Image (spheres, grey):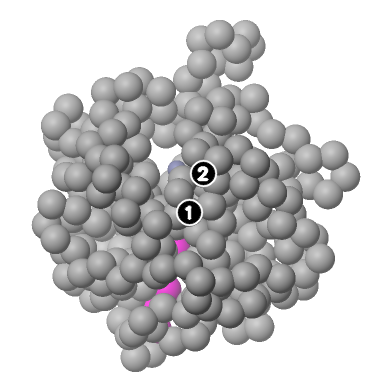
Amino acid sequence: MRVLDPTYEGLESAAAVCHALLVETDAHGLVLVESGLGLDSVDRPAEVLDPEWVELVSPRLDRGETALSRVAELGYDPADVRHIVLTHLDVDHAGGLPDFPEARVHVMAAEYEAAMAEGPSRRYRPAHWAHGPRWETYGTGHGQEWYGFAGVQALRGLPEEFLLVPLGGHTAGHAAVAVRAGKEWLVHAGDAYFYHRELDTGSPESHPLLDIVQLDSQVDAELRIANQGRLRELASGHADEVSVFSAHDPWEFARFTQRS
Ligand SMILES: [Zn+2]
């Protein structure tokens, strides 16, 4: 994706990615964390996507960039993706759902309810759940404490290495997804922040262009900023056990893909 802003002189556009994780489990098949845009968005953008959103972010409409293609490229059968865990239901996170019609889809209940009530809107596109996914939703008021975060929930049908960490602000039911890999927790923070320097402890900075999208799309500024602060503390205070990354930052994406 490229975020465009003609009013910001000297910075015409910023590259952005849709960072997804594919997790191979012993007993539960493949688990996809985030699904990006799918084949329907690539093939029929005028029908599936909102034109204003397309203008704002200029998504790269390439079949090879979809999660479906990437899973196959890694040598796996996309039909083995049995679970999809989503940080939220924005188009660039839930767009790949129709490509994995048999997967159980895990998301916070507040997010599910907001999307069903609001869609079709710029962010929520009902085409992405028209196939009737097997939803697994998680209400608030349950769950455990995890590194100081409350209401953290284990996922139905998955081992305890997968957690949903409520982090509202960007959307009504936004959450981070934590996945334990050996001794480390990988924390996919979705759109809880947009640029790695926002997690700097000294003088955090947002990205001038990515911040336009961040501010434009938030539903609760105060909560978003508070949760970003908590993530900053998690990342800096537990750097030896926890690695935090976000959905759209291309620098983080490069760092993590090089690492693996
Ligand atoms: Zn996003």
Q: Quadrant location of ligand 1?
A: top left
Q: Choose top left, top right, bottom left or bottom right for residue 157.
A: bottom left
Q: Is residue 74 visible?
A: no
**Ligand 1 neighbours mark 1 (CB distance < 8 Å):** no
Left or right: where 153 falls relative to 45: right
Q: Amino acid at mark 1?
A: His
Horizontal and vertical percent position of residue 18: 44, 47
- Please report the residue visible at 52 percent of the width from the left and 21 percent of the height from the top: 13
- Please report the residue visible at 73 percent of the width from the left and 63 percent of the height from the top: 234
Res. 50 mark: none
Res. 174 mark: 1
Check disc 1: other Cα within 10 Å, few if <14, some if 14-19, many if 20+: many
Q: Is residue 7 visible?
A: yes
Q: Nearer the viewer, residue 253 or 134?
A: 134
- Please report the residue visible at 50 percent of the width from the left and 39 percent of the height from the top: 219
Q: Is residue 119 above or below residue 97?
A: above
Q: Nearer the viewer, residue 126 or 37?
A: 126
Q: Amino acid at mark 2?
A: His
Left or right: where 10 falls relative to 234: left
**Label 2 sits on residue:** 170
Q: Secondary structure at mark 2?
A: loop
Question: Is the C-beta separation of discs 1 and 2 under 8 Å?
Answer: yes
Q: Nearer the viewer, residue 62 or 115?
A: 115
Q: Is residue 65 magenta?
A: no
Q: Nearer the viewer, residue 25 or 176?
A: 176
- Please report the residue visible at 69 percent of the width from the left and 34 percent of the height from the top: 206
Span highlighted in magenta in the image: 21-25
Horizontal and vertical percent position of residue 94: 31, 51
Check disc 2: other Cα within 10 Å, few if <14, some if 14-19, many if 20+: many
Left or right: where 164 falls relative to 22: right
Q: Which residue sits furthest bottom?
A: 27
Q: Is residue 99 above or below residue 78?
A: above
